[in-house]
Amino acid sequence: MGTGTLVLLDDKTCPVGMTLNMMEFFAQESCGWCTPCREGLQWAAYLLREIEEGRGKLEDLDVLAEQVWFMASDKCFCDLAPGATQPLEAALRLFRDDFVAHLKAGRCPYAPAEADESAGAGLAGEAGEPAEPGAAAAAPAGKAAG
Amino acid sequence: MSAERTGGAAELVTVTIDGREFQVEAGRNMLDIALSLGFDLPFFCWHPLMGSIGACRQCAVRLYWTGRDGEEKSEIAMACMTEAQEGTRIDIDDEEAVRFRAEMIELMMLSHPHDCPVCDEGGECHLQDMTVMTGHSYRRYAGRKRTFRNQDLGPFVTHELNRCITCYRCTRLYNDYAGGHDFGVFGLRNEIYFGRDQDGTLESEFSGNLVEVCPTGVFTDKTLAGHYSRKWDLQTAPSVCPHCGLGCSTTPGAGYGGVRRVVSRYSREVNKMFLCDRGRYGYEYVNAPQRIRAARVAWRPATQVAGQSSADARREQALDAAAVLLRGRRAIGIGSPRASLEDNYALRSLVGADRFYLGLSESDYDLVGDVLAAAGAGGGSAGAGGLPPGALADVQEADAVLILGEDLTDTAPMADLTVRTWLRLRPTAQEERVHIRRWNDAAVGRAKRREPSALWIAAPHAGKLDELAAEAWHAAPDDIARLALALAHEVDPASPPVADLSGAENERVARWAQALHASRRPVVVGGVSGGSRTLLRAAAHLARVLDARTDDASGPARLILTVPESNSVGLRMMGGGRLPQAIAAVARGEADTVVILDNDLYRRTASLLVDDLFRREPDVLALAPLEDRVTAQAGVVLPSATVAESAGTFVNNEGRAQRFSSVLAPSGETREAWRWLRDLMGRLGRQEARGWRDVDDVIAALEHDLPQFRGVAAAAPRADWRLAGSEVARQPRRFSGRTAMDADVSVFEPAPDTDTDSALAYSLEGVGPAQAPAGLLPRTWSPGWNSASGLHKLQEEVNGPLRNGPVGARLLDRGLAGGASAAGITAGAGAGIAGGSAGGGAIAAGQPAPAAPGAHQARPDEFLLLPLHHIYGSDDRSMYTPGVAGRAPAPYIALGSADAGRLGLADGDWLELWQPWMDVRAPFRLLPSLPEGVAGVPAGLPDMPFLSLPGRSRITRTDAPPAGQAPASGAAWAPTGGAWSPDATPAGEATP
């Protein structure tokens, strides 16, 4: 991913959450000089958090893909954003199912169920097991902000 | 961008844009080229004068090249960072590039507020224009917008940072080009903050340019907000700044009977795209309550004049009254350096050449005369006489600049900015070696940090430019003159040496001479503001000697001289007597009536002399736009128009005649001074002015009568210019308020104002900016380009001349010494006026080296008193703007560290100085850099009396005046009587 490194995730780690973590880091790192990086990285981090926290929409995946496009190396002043969007590109390509699972579940399927959630939804989170996509049906529908 | 900025001769290469081939100058960037060729390509961070930084990514295009394997490759590239080389090929109309450019707008809009309807930038917003151009319309981002706290940046500039798109233009202009220190860029990622470290007035004299440079509504004109109009509701016309002698081009905007704001108008030779804050914000005097709107006759009840009759009838009554003062009487006229050539000429015609006096201070009369003398024979640079006067644009091509005795920041602010811009953009050997292009701004900035400066300053005290100089030396004017003459001797041994140079002086001369020897195109900057004729002549001599160098590598040298007021040079060229002679003529009983043209004489000579003039009770006819101490004592006052309400010509410091046009019609009984004077001549049965229907007729008479003014008519198109029968429209097509503006008074649409003096109409119908001749260009606008950033649409190429003809006409190039011109110049002196001082004969061919003065000697009992100029304060007209007045200094008397130490002075002490006719008491101010034995007082402050400067004066410590008698921070002054006027009654404490 990204800089040619391989990152190994076990089956209990959410690839969306990991991508979010990296994008938030890179968005912090942006110096603010050129527009695609300055605005694009924080927008990408924002969308990933929306998805990770269950407020994502299917269109957001298209927007994320577009962000990978406009932060390519011929379009930015330096290589921070092109490097930063490599993991995002890989995640969108390799873990699309997990993204979709987030959108359908309206929450992160890898996260343990929270105590105040309904019993039906709570089952899926047992022992940190990945949630079955179907289990999300009982969760509140994903709601976009704003 | 011409060859000078690419650092060499123009080599042509073939580039391809959207499949079309063009021959262009190699080394320019492709954005510059595309815009110059007429392509529409959006941009933000690129600026025509500040170059490219590649930050905003808005000018994306597809760039093609052939790889090593012979295969054609392409990628998205920024046009502004792409150098034109043989075969460079870009597509603007590329699908991915088009999509990317729209995407960049979406990104900039992520946090941009939806406040266009209440944003002062609306209607002239580059961001609006670029958004429309790229086609972006729908924002997908739904998160929180980043917000900032705004700052109070003082009286001139509003700060609304949420609108920021982070193009970095503001900090580049303010810090990198204008040299500001109190503004900057803070933060990182999408929270970049442009502002000060805390609230406070922007310190730079060029802060107003932020308003024009900012592509959106972050920085807007705070004075405009006080009486706001949209750009499309502003009536605009080309004008010339009246607030110093440089003659910057301006575009005032008027509405509701007043001037609403002033923005820069492009002038390639003078101010480029910028203005100083005095010029931009000094316009409020036009709207001031002190304006005279009605004629006034002192000896009749006001009701009779200002009764129910029409304005025309009241004008006639006033003319009748004025004619009474002139008919069969011996009248003299006193002109004004801030009135147009036409107004001054009309007065000269009324009273006769031998009874026309210039109304300049003695010092200015001599010094501006010396400025003309320095232009001498002109024509060829190797001529025996003078040099053609240098223009600000000449600085751009210099490789060394010597400033001798001038504090440019305060006396000619745009000259300061020109020098700063030159320092950043001048080509250097290092940049040539590594092929840094002039437009590559970040690289140029980094390279310049390692280059030694090419600016050398010798001035009486420290100035803001000092920090950029290779060496800044503070000395008395005579010592600076010695330096200049010693340098002239170093350059050309035939120039006489300076005797008795001290060891330190010799070392300094050696250092500076080395810089001059290395330079090929030096520019010497001097001027009148220090008040020293010796220094001005020494500076001119040095420039002549440098210019006359004959080694192959040396190019021409230039001499740029500042003058005090907008028409100082024009008035001095016209010729006439000195002000004290006018007063003497009244005292001798040789004049019964004095006609004074827009001139507060109390600013020109000692108040005792002016008081004496009035005490002789001549009949005084004043033509003035504003109440002052002269109009208060005049028998008849005729309201004359300001620059904003009339057409006329100023001649700037380089002898460039520039026409200004009215931007709003004069109101009430106000009219152009020359029209009043024309009608007066008619009343008196005189024939000269009968044919003067419009300003062109006055100019024709002027050119015919005074040959030195031949060429003035060419400064702008004639009033009868038409394109397909149409005049140029002052109002934009969308001028929406036309029928509603006065609806609170009357619902009937008023008849449009008329103006016979220019080919500009008070109408939205007519020729627009694209077709208007450059001399009539009413505003910067073309379809799709509503902001100041669309200027290139009106230029032949980016940074090139305006399309559709020249602006202004230089008058001094052909020389003054020969033929009729010299006769005209010296007419005043030759007309029975004993005007020739020791240096009066300087206007002559073949100027010898001036004699070197002795070194300045500090005397314990007497100080050399110099005028200290202030951008805010020394020009009284701009002081009607509250923001300008608020930044003007209170009166003071300044001494240097050595003298202050010797006298044991501290803050809060008061000093008293004596001049022959005047005592002044004012608070002490420490100006550490003032040389020993030199004192300074602020020049031209309304609160200060006139002092004859430079002068010599005893200065002693005194007690602060008791509370209530004088403002704590002000000055107290009292005429002390003197030899001039034995019958003068000693006045008590006069009021400032």
Image: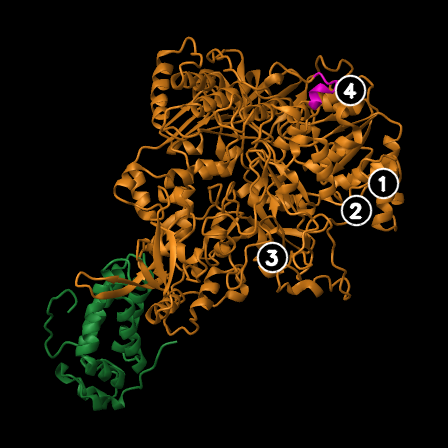
- The span from disc 3 to disc 1 (Cα, nearest Å) is 36 Å
Instruction: Please report contact status of discs 2 and 4: CB closer than 8 Å, yes or no.
Output: no
Give the residue type that dot 3 points to: Tyr
Q: Which mark is residue B318?
A: 1
Give the residue type that dot 1 points to: Ala
- The span from disc 2 to disc 3 (Cα, nearest Å) is 26 Å
Question: What element does badge 2 sit on?
Answer: loop
Front-most of residues B695 and B171: B695
Mark before the other along the chain sequence, 1 or 4: 1
Front-most of residues B171 and B543: B543
Q: Which mark is residue B585?
A: 4
User: Closer to the observer: label 3 or label 4?
Assistant: 4
- The span from disc 2 to disc 4 (Cα, nearest Å) is 32 Å
Which residue position is annotated with label 3? B228
Q: Colour of chain B?
A: orange
Q: Same chain for marks 2 and 3?
A: yes
Image quarter where the N terminus of chain A lies is bottom left
> What residue do we see at 34% from left, 39% from top?
B427
The quadrant holding residue B845 is top right
> What residue do we see at 70% from left, 23% from top?
B827
Instruction: Please report contact status of discs 1 and 4: CB closer than 8 Å, yes or no.
Output: no
Which residue position is annotated with label 2? B669
Q: Which residues are magenta?
A: B827-834
Q: Same chain for marks 3 and 1?
A: yes
Mark before the other along the chain sequence, 2 or 4: 4
- The span from disc 1 to disc 4 (Cα, nearest Å) is 26 Å
